[in-house]
Amino acid sequence: MEGFIYRVVNFLEHPRLPYRLALVSILLTAPSLWVGFHLDDNVGRFLLAGVADPTAKQLLEAYGSPYGIANGKPASNLWQIEHGFAPFWTYEKLLISLWRPLSEFTHRIDFYLTPDSSFEMHAHGLLWFAALVIAVTALYRKLMGVTTVAGVASLLFAIDHTHGFTVGYMANRNATIALFFGALTLYFHDHWRTKESKKAALLAPMFFLCGLLSGESAVAIFGYLTAYTVFLDFGSLRRRITGLLPSLAVLSLWQVYYSSAGYGARGSGLYIDPIHEPIQFACAMCERIPVLALGQLLLPPAEAYNYAPKALAVAIWIGALVFLLSFIAVALPLILRDALARFWALGSFLSLIPICTSHPNNRLLFYVGLGAMALLAQLWHGLVDHADWLLECKLWRRFAHGLIAVVTAFHLFISPLLLPFSACSILLSSAVNRAVERISNEAGLKDTDLVIVNSPDYFLVKLIPMFIALEERPKPRRLRALSFGPIAIEITRLNTNTLSVFYRGGILQTPLLELYRDADIPMHKGEGIDLQGLRIEVTEITRDGRASRVEFRFDDNLDDESFRWMKWDGEFYVPFQPPAVGATVNLPPAVVPYGF
């Protein structure tokens, strides 16, 4: 037994541990090399791979950046609706445009060197993940010394299953790059403050800027810098605050440019603006923080809360709150006694705040895990080493040993088993690719009006013209979609040219459907838009201002051969025959069969 413990300690304290853990992380996430392109990966291909279709350039302008879906300009949003890239109910001033030039540059390199090879692009992403593991391990050793506890923290971070989706989903590479630069920021910030290195004083804010230019998530690093200033920096209050000023200046200048250049989010129900909606954001924090904390430390993943039925979602939240309070009760004695533990705890908590602007998801937990894994390693080491911060209460000690044993064992033995599957979990959306590829390969689409009567998701419509362009196939003259999401609809034909669609319960029934319009932005009876060959008008609304009945008046007879009508049948789009004048057709909710 002593020999085994010696080997474990030697591994955790070995000088080459950062590189060994980097190799472990690559091996565990290597299955993602073969997952291919999915969802936003295909959008990136269309926008950045030099597709001959002129709409690619126009769509990039309408997005404002490759990381976006709308630039906030009504004319651009209307153009998207006209070309089938957005639903007809899109908020006219919708803005979701994110500025990530460094991450964008890495994708442009990919599409320049290997435009059609997802394998090489995923390999590129794995190299960034390996670099991140090395940087984080170096940071842990910088702050905790070359010790067993630093080694355990590094191991827990390297095999954390919550990283899988971000690493395996090519479009999320920005999070890996941003945290890589964030870890370097903290490393050199500490070196500057403890060694008074002028070089480190320049490198820390420089790397912070690189993180912000890689992804907005790097804002969380300022939370860790704040925690460092409060708990780890030394000297007078003035000296400590002075140490934070360079990074604060970088953050302020970045924010000023970001906003003045028209980047940000507005009008979408998937994002909350903390500045303009403080009460709503505060409520969202109370709801989401326990779910995110549970997703970081145990199961279920945070995104399960979004998809669960209401009763189950309530049960998940209650369980998450009980777990979070229990973990705090166990960690509090250490936090009160140890400045480093306070740093990790506060940094991890502050990194939770910005991600509460969106719906809970494990892929948002990169920065939370940075502090959480270090704190967990400290707790584990204290319990094993009978540290003096442990309470004398036997009941508390038993509870603490049990809770930390479960959480640590989960991350040491279950998490590395889940990581490969998590890295490939984007394959759950394979049904989207199959359905879009099938309709994109339909014969006879050229010069037709392709009308999708009901679609499970936005991607299943907007990817159609992208796939057609990528495959260089003839495209339809127009693309129209009447309904999105799991909503039962009734289609009544009012005359030869007009359909009335009744959305049972109204549009935007689930939060995930609110990407293009916050459900709290009301629609009005008589509101509508004019497209080429089509007038869309809201004729009935729900009590809370969501459209429940909409008329679609086409210029041509609906039975004209120029129309190609399609409906969702549970797995693919199949032909649809518009009803006779005066007749009604009922269609069930359209649902994507997510799975391998």
Image (tube, rainbow, N blue to C red):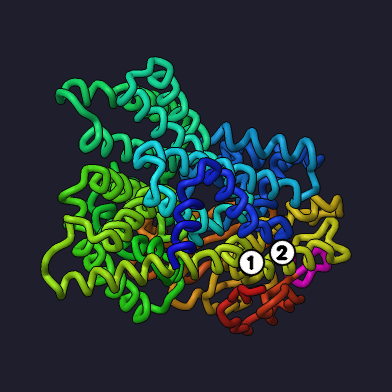
**Alpha carbon separation for disc pair 2 and 1:** 7 Å
Q: Relative to the observer, which residue lies in front, 427 or 560?
A: 427
Q: Circles 2 and 1: CB distance less than 8 Å? A: yes
Is 338 left, or right, of 121 in this rendering? left
Residue occupying the point 41% across, 26% down: 204
The residue that disc 1 covers is 429
User: Which quadrant would the C terminus be assigned to in this image?
Assistant: bottom right
SS assignment for the magenta stretch, majority: loop
Residue located beneath label 2 in the image: 433
Residue at figure coordinates x 66%, y 79% from the top left: 570
53 or 430, which is in the foreground? 430
Q: Residue furthest left?
A: 393
Establish if 108 lies above or below 425.
above
Where is 161 relative to 59, above or below? below
Q: Secondary structure at mark 1?
A: helix
In which quarter of the view is residue 100 placed? top right
Per the rendered image, the range of residues in magenta is 556-564
